[in-house]
Image (cartoon, rainbow, N blue to C red):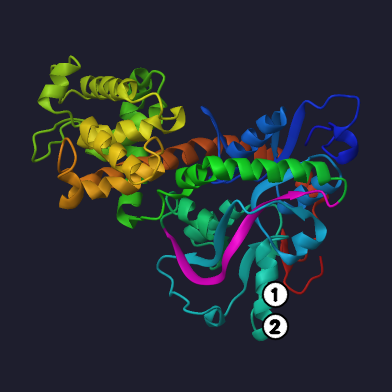
Amino acid sequence: MACQEQTVSDEKLSSAEPKTHLKVGTLYGPQIYITTGQGKYGFDYELAKRFARHLGLKLSMTPYASVSDLYAALENQDIDIIAAGLTETPNRKARFRLGPPLYFVDQILVYRQGSSRPRMITDIDEPITINADSAYVETLSRYQQQHPELTWKQVYGKDNEELLHLIAKGELQYTVSDSSSLLINRRMMPELRQGPILANDLPVVWLLPANQSDTLMSHLLEFWHKVNVKGTLEHLNERYFGHVKRFDYVDTRAFIRAIDSKLPKYKHLFQTYAGELDWRKLAATSYQESHWNPKARSPTGVRGMMMLTLPTAKQVGIKNRLDAEQSIEGGARYLKKLLRRLPDSIPENQRIWFALASYNIGMGHVEDARKLAENMGLNPSAWRDVKQVLPLLQQRQYYQKTRYGYARGSEAAHYVDNIRRYYDTMVWLDSQSAHFDEKSEMSQTTAILSPPKNSKESEVSASQPK
């Protein structure tokens, strides 16, 4: 599965043969690593790219079928490092070297909407299904010491997202998930519900080989310090997790239905007029504006798929706002115009969020928020900082000092968050076919490498030794 290049170690970093790639093992997951027709995404993927660049190497990132396979690959030196959203545990600490904390998560019991909510883990009267070799094994083992009646079963060949999917379908009763994964996945599986928190504030870390990794660890610590000082970790945390905390079950279900029933009719128009933009961001904006209704109208007089005002429609050369194609073309032109007008200091990967906020409340108000952020010692070119400041435009003590005055800044912040969530959902759906194809190939190898199983296929009881 993984290519057989030399690994990063003290001995091999000093080898006469130059190293060209940093080989990273990972797992699939919306917050970790996914592939789509338009590229690769994920917190760990983006950070690994930056780390490879820090080392002067190219990134070679390989998804594996399970945590067990990742462990084997690292110990066999098929990969240099594991970057897969894994938390620090006593067993992992004893077996590998752990990098510095990237972010913190809780471990949460997950069940399906419609089932009775367990208030405590002792309320559960049937086994909890978890992944083999996951951190949840150690957590449940600790609980079992106090509650011998607690049982669980470990499964091989399925990732966390697949178990969550089985919960959402009603085929499993309970599983355990990290809070970050649950927050993201319930945007695609709104039936998921949060039960008791089993463990708090666990650091997510990368795993390095136990031996011959002093140099790699030194580079990683240097890199970690660098990205902390620059705010890169905060930026990635905000990008992947900052917009998913607000959750609306009805809205999420309606959006998923609309992707099936409405989007196919307009998808080619979004793709045609998006140009250099990711068409899914344009489509997500349109859904936020009109729910993909070409006849939509607001009390303030904006109309159509992209809810253009009459002056804006004239400005971008649109004659009929109720024509779906014209509206999408006009909305795309206007959004691109806003992107061009933004200050050069705003990084490329954050410009779209500033442009969308401007689409909602106007560029003048967004510029007011940027100046407020700067006056407060925040970064006016970082969306995570300006997002915090936007609601202040509704408070007299702040807006009376701005050039453009009062604005519904909290609405603009929620507006952008909603679009990001809709976009995430479309990216996730787009990734499923690629995920299925690659996972099908890996499952053939997994079937050969997996440990012996009991009478239930792909399961092992809590008491069975590993």
The image quarter in which residue 462 lies: bottom right
**Of 356 and 383, the residue lying toward us:** 383
Q: Is residue 196 magenta?
A: yes
> Label 1: which residue?
141
Please state, as top left, top right, bottom left or bottom right, where the C terminus lies in the image: bottom right
Q: Residue at x 35, y 50 (%)?
A: 252
**Three-letter amino acid code at disc 1?**
Ser
Let me know if residue 110 is in the magenta part: no
Per the image, label 1 sits on a secondary structure element best described as: helix
Residue 122, horizontal then vertical, whole percent: 56, 82
- Residue highlighted by disc 2: 145
In this view, which residue lies farthest toward the top?
317
Picture layout, residue 466 above or below residue 435:
below
Q: Callout 1: few (<14), some (14-19), or many (20+) C-alpha neighbours within 10 Å?
A: some
The kind of residue on which mark 2 rests is Gln
Q: Nearer the viewer, residue 247 or 250?
A: 247
Distance between mark 2 and mark 1 Cα atoms: 7 Å
Residue at 36% of width from left, 56% of height from top?
247
Closer-to-camera residue (273/205): 205
Which span of residues is magenta-colored?
Answer: 191-210
Q: Residues within 10 Å of mark 2 (few under 14, many from 20)?
A: few
Q: Is the residue under label 1 in contact with that under label 2 (CB below 8 Å)? A: yes
Query: Magenta part mainly helix, strand or loop?
Result: strand
Q: Is residue 70 above or below residue 325?
A: below
The quarter of the rendered structure image containing the N terminus is: top right
- Horizontal placement of 294 versus 332: left or right? left
Q: Identify the residue at horizontal 9%, vertical 38% (top origin).
A: 300
Instruction: Give the image quarter of residue 284.
Output: top left
Q: Position of residue 397 (x, y in %)?
A: 18, 51
